Image (cartoon, rainbow, N blue to C red):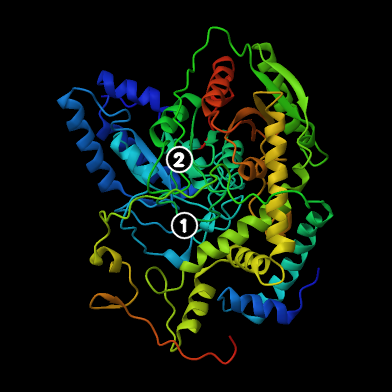
Amino acid sequence: MSLSHEEVVHIAHLARLALSQDELARYREQLSSILDHVAKLQVLDTEDIEPMTSILISQSRLRDDTPGACLTEQELLSNAPASEADQFRVPPVLDQESA
Amino acid sequence: MHVPDLAGLTIYRALDGLQKGEFTSRELTQAYLERIERLDPQVHAFLHVASEEALRQAAAADERRAQGGKLPALLGIPLAVKDVLAVAGYPATCGSRILDGFMPPYTATAVSRLQQAGVVILGKTNTDEFAMGSSTENSAFGVTHNPWDLQRVPGGSSGGSAAAVASGFAPAALGTDTGGSIRQPASFCGMTGFKPTYGRISRYGLIAYGSSLDTIGALAHDARDLALLYELMAGFDPLDATSLETPVERSQLDSQEGLKGLRIGVPEEYFIAGLHPAVEHAVREAVAEMEKLGAQVAQVSLPHTEYAVPVYYLIAPAEASANLARFDGVRYGLRVDSDDMVEMFKETRGAGFGSEVKRRSMLGTYALSAGYYDAYYGQAQKVRTLIKSDFERAFEQVDVIAAPVAPTTAFPIGEHSGDPLAMYLEDVFTLPANLAGVPGIAFPVGFDSRGLPVGMQLMGAHFDEARLFRAAHIYQSATDWHTRRPALEN
């Protein structure tokens, strides 16, 4: 299974990773090799097998919607790279040419 | 007052000494801190040592002990914690530049239960970045060296924790096991380590890697210490939606009857061409020893074992790609500035993540992307069901499954650097237990011709931790592999 350069560029974009040309080439080779290995699974007939979405719990556990203790604003902002008043400060989100 | 030799000091021995007044917690903690300062530059087990804080906690423990009454179970016992677990007041880097400087505002449930039991937290130990790796070479802050041979890896991803206990820097350390990350470093470092049934120990406060696979466990010198840690950490936590309500059984460790009544299964699929002869020999000897202690041994089959690597290396990266999406430079950790937010995400993650994390993020992203989901992730989830069924069927015939932990003993630092797939294939014996969600315990059963430890694992049915601790303890009562120490000082 050989990934093309364009496919790796696309995956990097989806994964929000800025990669150098060297990295793109290296990951293209390594990912292709790994995907070759995992393709082994295709030989198995899993037509009647249920996918394992959870180890042991079959239902989501719900609780009453009652508020409890939570972290303070100060605690939540304490690790912020940039903040202003009670908010995280970020660059503007611009329209994307290629989403 | 006399603090005993720290190399090999168990929790039980330390508790005994504290109770009898042989030494105080402050003296014990000070002794560990001095040993760490003297020897950790060679090992690099710790990413962060909190000397003042630890001594403060130790002093508080001594005061509490002086008050008398019913004392918390681990009062004054020093402990190290893998750096993927949040402990308020201590940094948490997950071995990554992207969390350099991050101070968690809360503490993981597993840790806070041990804090309530009175432990003293010495510091945070090294790990492969976001627990992705089998050697601790993927840490952004340098590799940890195996105290048995400093040119070799301690295993991973809980390599820092394994090396810390093996070096006598703490009587025990917390780790995590998502694909073998406690059992394999335990094996490489001659330690005893366990992973619980998935859902037994709350994952609240564990910085997530693979949410359907992650478990918290510990490494120590013997099964008796581990059973104590397990009983204190395990049990339902409303803060973890995958936490189980099944009651935690106390291990009845001592036995007049040895292993009589225990049915051990030996899986044929684990004894394959790549298994190093020294490993196979030590494991088979250990099984023979257990038979002498009264166990019955039978061959079992886990036919889908060969698919564990491809299944894991689709599911774990897929889950990791989702879990690591939160590291974007917005709320915590590294930020590489940009005029545009998406560029900021890309530059931050490009600079902050190491190559293994990037590789798995991309693999996972691809496996989940439109058009590929069913063929990759979907198929992997179905084969995962088959792997879990293999175990369920085997446990109809036997009580525990005995197997090697890794195909080799500790390999040299740098050996697998160029070949990620070769590294993945090393995980073949540990991955199945995580995929099936079953508990496992690894303990030393011998050495190879280079003097490197060999570990064996016992895997049990869901919820059968007590039986695993008991079996390992009885084996350890009849053997002494777990008492051997590396000659670190020379």
Q: CA distance from mark 1 to mark 2?
A: 19 Å
Q: Quadrant of residue B277?
A: top right
Q: Residues within 10 Å of mark 2 (few under 14, many from 20)?
A: many
Q: Residue at position x 72%, y 33% from top?
A: B279
Question: Compared to B160, does B348 lie above or below?
Answer: below
Give the image location of residue B23, x and y in percent. Answer: 27, 25
Q: Secondary structure at mark 1?
A: loop
The residue under label 2 is which amino acid type? Ile
Q: Nearer the viewer, residue B403 or A20?
A: B403
Chain letter of disc 1 in the image: B
Q: Residue at position x 48%, y 62% from top?
A: B96
The residue under label 1 is which amino acid type? Cys
Decide which of tag 1 and tag 2 comes sooner along the chain. 1
Question: Compared to B349, does A59 lie above or below?
Answer: above
Chain letter of disc 2 in the image: B
| Residue lying farthest to the left in this orientation | B67
Give the image location of residue B112, x and y in percent. Answer: 33, 43
- Report the residue marked by disc 2: B201
Judge whether residue A56 can be spotted in this image.
yes
Task: Name the image quarter holding the N terminus of chain B.
Answer: top left
Give the image location of residue B80, x and y in percent. Answer: 40, 42
Nearer mark to the viewer, of 1 and 2: 2
Q: Secondary structure at mark 2?
A: loop
- Report the residue marked by disc 1: B94
Q: Nearer the viewer, residue B377 or B290?
A: B377
